[in-house]
Image (tube, helix red, strand yellow):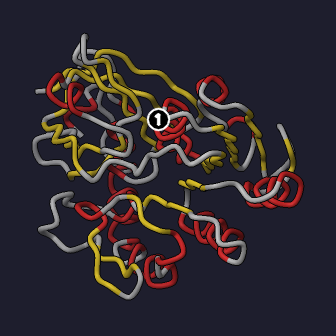
């Protein structure tokens, strides 16, 4: 059992959870994730480890309520617990002293890019971060990102906060005005990561993206997270989750990610139509 110590609503549908997981807290590195199971009969899903406190034995997870399982997790409160927390899993993010690095977080992807930006800053890099979302209320971890960045740029699709436009617009402006950065890390929706790869491909800027969202089992056994990288078959959970963005076959990836869209939507609708109960552990 992995007790939830604290929860915090960061934005509509986005929740931060502090969870007791002492062994994970001691070993996790930037880019690692855990597989969690909220209920005894629940689905196992991957969540990136946003932060950890080895002394307290806690880890921080951030979840966006999209499907049935993430809705259930978002309703958990302090005092409840996860049935399983398995990790740390995945290969740590490749972190070196590159020089100037741009870290891009789209939507809840900011939760994933944050520990990477912090690790890159600690490695001696000049970190320029771009955080984007559809609107102001979906911007998360702005203060945390500012603290680990030499410069922070915030964008919103509707212009309600920061710069109006997409994260790729801000990235292109950096390239045009300041010149090529030495590396780019981008994490967010697949179309966003593909767009970033398109921007950095021609100027040949090394770029990493995280394929965390496509994972299910997390151990390489189920094969659901198969991806084509440089023409080779890879598994996002054990070979990644970060990969060279210019080598990822995004068309195939996006198509594969829609495989379970129908069953997922049906499960969510069934859950929403449940009989109301005060104990979300029974859902």
At label 1, counting other C-alpha atoms closer than 10 Å, the crowd grade (few under 14, some 14-19, many 20 or more) is: many
| Quadrant of the frame with the N terminus | top left
User: What x and y, as percent, mark residue 87?
Assistant: 18, 41
Quadrant of the rendered image containing residue 161: top right
User: What x and y, as percent, mark residue 254?
Assistant: 48, 76
Residue drawn at (17%, 22%), measured in percent from left and top?
22
What secondary structure is found at the residue carrying circle 1? helix
- In the depicted view, which residue is nearer to us: 151 or 107? 151
Residue 13 to residue 46: above or below? above
Residue drawn at (59%, 25%), measured in percent from left and top?
144
Quadrant of the rendered image containing residue 47: top left
User: What x and y, as percent, mark residue 217?
Assistant: 19, 60
Residue furthest bottom in the image? 231
Residue drawn at (34%, 73%), measured in percent from left and top?
260
Residue drawn at (45%, 44%), measured in percent from left and top?
65
Residue 147 to residue 62: above or below? above
| Quadrant of the frame with the C terminus | top left
**Residue matched to label 1:** 119
Locate residue 251 relative to residue 53 in the image: left or right: right
User: What x and y, as percent, mark residue 16?
Assistant: 44, 28
Residue 177 to residue 152: above or below? below
């Amino acid at each position: 059992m992995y007790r939830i110590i604290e929860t915090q609503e960061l934005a509509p549908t986005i929740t931060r959870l502090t969870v007791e997981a002492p062994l994970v807290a001691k070993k996790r590195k930037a880019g690692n994730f855990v597989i969690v199971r909220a209920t005894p009969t629940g689905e196992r899903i991957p969540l990136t480890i946003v932060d950890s406190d080895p002394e307290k034995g806690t880890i921080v997870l951030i979840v966006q309520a999209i499907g049935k399982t993430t809705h259930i997790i978002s309703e958990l409160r302090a005092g409840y617990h996860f049935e399983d927390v398995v990790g740390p899993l995945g290969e740590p993010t490749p972190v070196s002293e590159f020089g100037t690095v741009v870290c891009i977080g789209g939507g809840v992807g900011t939760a994933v890019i944050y520990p990477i930006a912090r690790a890159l800053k600690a490695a001696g890099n000049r970190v320029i971060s771009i955080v984007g979302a559809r609107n102001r209320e979906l911007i998360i971890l702005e203060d945390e990102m500012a603290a680990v960045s030499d410069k922070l740029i915030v964008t919103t699709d509707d212009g309600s906060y920061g710069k109006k436009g997409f994260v790729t617009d801000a990235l292109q402006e950096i390239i045009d005005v300041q010149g090529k950065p030495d590396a780019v890390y981008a994490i967010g929706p697949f179309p966003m990561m593909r767009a970033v790869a398109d921007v950095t491909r021609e100027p040949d800027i090394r770029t990493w993206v995280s394929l965390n969202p496509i994972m299910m089992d997390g151990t390489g056994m189920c094969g659901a997270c198969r991806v084509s990288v440089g023409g080779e078959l890879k598994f996002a959970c054990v070979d990644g989750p970060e990969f060279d963005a210019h080598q990822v076959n995004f068309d195939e990836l996006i198509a594969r990610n829609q495989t379970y869209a129908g069953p997922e939507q049906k499960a969510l609708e069934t859950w929403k139509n449940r009989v109301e109960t005060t104990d979300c552990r029974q859902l």
